[in-house]
Amino acid sequence: MSLIENAYTGILEPALIEEIEAVATLKTFQSGEIIVDIGQYIRAMPLLLTGAIKIMREDEKEGELLLYYLAKGETCTMSIACCVGNKKSEIRAQAEMETTVAMIPNQYLNEWLGKYSSWRNFILNSYSSRMNEMLGAIDNLAFSKMEDRIMNYLKEKVKLTEDRILTVTHQDIAMDLNTSRVVVSRILKKLENEDKIVLLRNEIRVLV
């Protein structure tokens, strides 16, 4: 079974998967590599096959805010909008770990909407899921204490990596949550004292 079949069987119909395999370009990115950058024109839509991608937005002071993560079998709806509208990207997509994507040339996006019901459903469901995640990110930013935001961040990374030991620095967390490293370090120490995490060298073991 190919990577595309493995990721999208049950989501997309077999005939469409065959077309994707015929036209897609597979690209692999290492952890930390930029897949799509702010201000970049997007000429192909990424379908995530393995790994995970974090989607970030930049503020006026060039600080970054984590919006949501993408996992296998998902796509970034913001990149779809840029592809269809020939607009520059307003987000940054970065590989969270070694990640492989299938890049679909723009000309097929609209063609498949009329041709395959599974593609229409996939695009609509993707928009719905990403919208809910963005609303969650806004609620988290507006209404949650920083301690809760950090704990939610760690739990989400555990879910993505399927590993309770996370390779992440205090500075990494501060950048993703658009706060200071000092604040992050203080809260992480508090969480450790509450037996929710264990702090290691450039790693965090999540216990809850």
Image: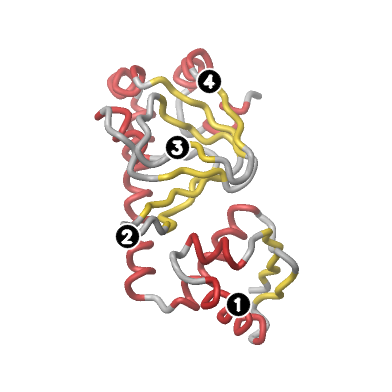
Q: Which amino acid does the dot numbered 1 rest on?
A: Leu
Q: Examine the image and state in which quarter residue 9 appears.
A: top right
Task: Tell me the crowding category of disc 2: few under 14, some 14 to 19, or many 20 or more residues within 10 angstroms, Cα based.
Answer: few
Q: Residues within 10 Å of mark 3 (few under 14, many from 20)?
A: some
Furthest residue toward right: 201
Between residues 147 and 125, which one lies in front from this camera angle?
A: 147
Q: Amino acid at mark 4?
A: Thr
Frontmost of labels 2 and 3 is 3
Q: Is residue 44 above or below residue 206?
A: above
The residue sitting at 48% across, 19% down in the picture is 20
Q: Label 2 belongs to which residue?
A: 135
Is the residue under label 2 in contact with that under label 1 (CB below 8 Å)?
Answer: no
Looking at the picture, does residue 140 appear above or below residue 36? below
Quadrant showing the N terminus = top right
The one of 203 and 20 positioned closer to us in this rendering: 203
Marks 1 and 3 sit apart, C-alpha to C-alpha, by: 31 Å
**Between discs 1 and 3, the one toward the N terminus:** 3
Task: Give the residue at the far left of this rendering.
Answer: 85
Give how far apart the Cα atoms at labels 2 and 3 are: 22 Å
Q: Tell me the CA gap for discs 4 and 1.
A: 41 Å
